[in-house]
Amino acid sequence: MSTVIDQTITLNIVLLATRLAEAAIDSRTALQAIEAGRRNEAIGTLLPLKRELTTVASLLDAILALHRMPEAGLPQGGAR
């Protein structure tokens, strides 16, 4: 049965996966730049990744916190 917590966890996992995929693309772009001898470009590509990885870690923390929440008192999905 789907609960509000399950739905929220699902949405957060989708967000997490999307952000990780974008970070992987940026990492590959940086790798291509450094392999082509463009160190400044590689580092410049990686700089925003630090903030993004902080956001990803926060999303993961939220997912795990939601998982640990008791379900009592929360409404079930669907109409009542």
Image: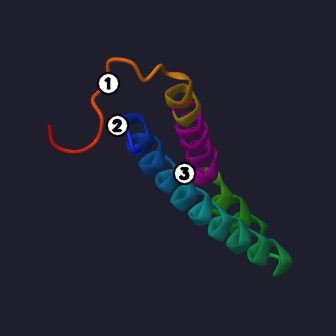
Name the residue carrying label 2: 4
Whole-percent x and y of residue 2? 39, 44
Q: Residue at 56% of width from left, 48% of height from top?
A: 52
Question: Going from the N terminus, do you reach mark 1 or mark 3 first?
Answer: 3
Left or right side of 12 for 38: right
Magenta part, dominant SS: helix
Locate residue 72: give its quadrant: top left
Q: How many marks?
A: 3
Residue type (three-letter) at the residue carrying disc 1: Leu
Lower position in the chain sequence, tag 2 or tag 3 = 2
Instruction: Quarter of the image for the N terminus: give it.
Output: top left
Q: Which residue is drawn at the image coordinates 62% and 52% (left, top)? A: 49
The magenta region covers 48-62
Judged from the image, the secondary structure of the residue bearing numbered disc 1 is: loop
**Could you tell me residue 24's position as x and y percent?**
67, 65
Give the residue at the far left of this rendering. 80
| Residue matched to label 1 | 74
Under circle 2, the secondary element is helix
Proximity of marks 2 and 1: CB atoms separated by less than 8 Å: yes
Rendered position, 80 above or below 35: above
Where 25 sits versus 10, above or below? below
- The percent coordinates of residue 74 (x first, y second) are 32, 24
Q: Is residue 75 left or right of residue 26?
A: left
Q: Is residue 53 magenta?
A: yes
